[in-house]
Image (spheres, helix red, strand yellow):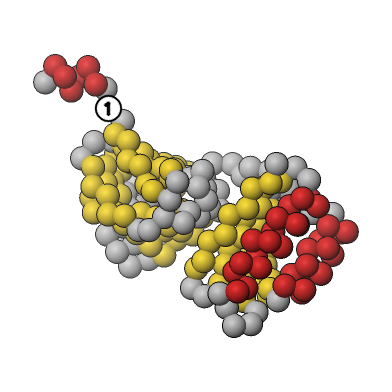
Amino acid sequence: MVQIKIKAINQSYIVVCSYDDFTECLTALKERLNVCVKSHSGSFEAFFRFSKPLCTNDFLQLLQCMNEIGVIMLGLKQESEKHDLMVLEQNLTSGQTYEFDREVLLLGSIYADTYVKSSESIYCIGTVSGNIDLIHDDCRLCASGFFQANIRICDSVYQNVTSFAPAQVYYDERNLITKELKEEKMWAVQ
């Protein structure tokens, strides 16, 4: 099985590859990147993320393939194991930028005009009002409430989310789904 996701960000690309067989992955990657090359006049930049560590031979094959296509590698991240959960006991304040590479449990709120970028899920005990960019399609954002939060997951467009009940936002085929986490029986009684 090979799964390749390509996301364009600021004139460059992020390429995420999950695979069982590296040879199949390289073939599929070459096909997908050739489509991107046609939309550019010359070479373009890309950052790569692989689900498994690459051996030396696989890495050399990847470099040769990117050279043939005309892709400039900005970097390479190889997943080896999941990181532990990061617990933050603070509010993420306005005007600040935060980047996370592991799951975050935030014991506070995300204020308006705050920019948060993460490659993993974020669980917020407080409310979310800032700008949230989650890189991968399996990321989720859970919070006690959302107030005009601008959220993007994977290749979706930014969506303005408001929910006065605890909810989670997740990705589904280029769309964001907001699921409120409430007990139906409790709401029906009121």
Residue 105 horizontal/vertical position (percent): 44, 42
The one of 29 and 86 positioned closer to us in this rendering: 29
The one of 65 and 128 positioned closer to us in this rendering: 65
Density class for disc 1 (Cα within 10 Å; few <14, some 14-19, many ≥20) is few
Residue 134 horizontal/vertical position (percent): 46, 53
**Who's the residue at 52% across and 75% down the image?**
11
Q: Is residue 102 visible?
A: yes
Q: Quick check: 168 above or below 49?
A: above
Q: Is residue 92 visible?
A: no
Which type of secondary structure does the marked residue at label 1 adopt?
loop
Residue 40 horizontal/vertical position (percent): 57, 78
**Who's the residue at 88% across and 59% down the image?**
57
Give the position of the C terminus as an image quadrant: top left
The one of 63 and 90 positioned closer to us in this rendering: 63
Residue 136 horizontal/vertical position (percent): 52, 51
Q: Which residue is mark 1?
A: 182
State left or right for residue 129 relative to residue 26.
left
Write down the quadrant of residue 116 in the picture. bottom left
Type of residue at label 1?
A: Lys
Write down the quadrant of residue 141 in the picture. top left
The one of 114 and 60 positioned closer to us in this rendering: 60
**Who's the residue at 73% across and 52% down the image?**
25
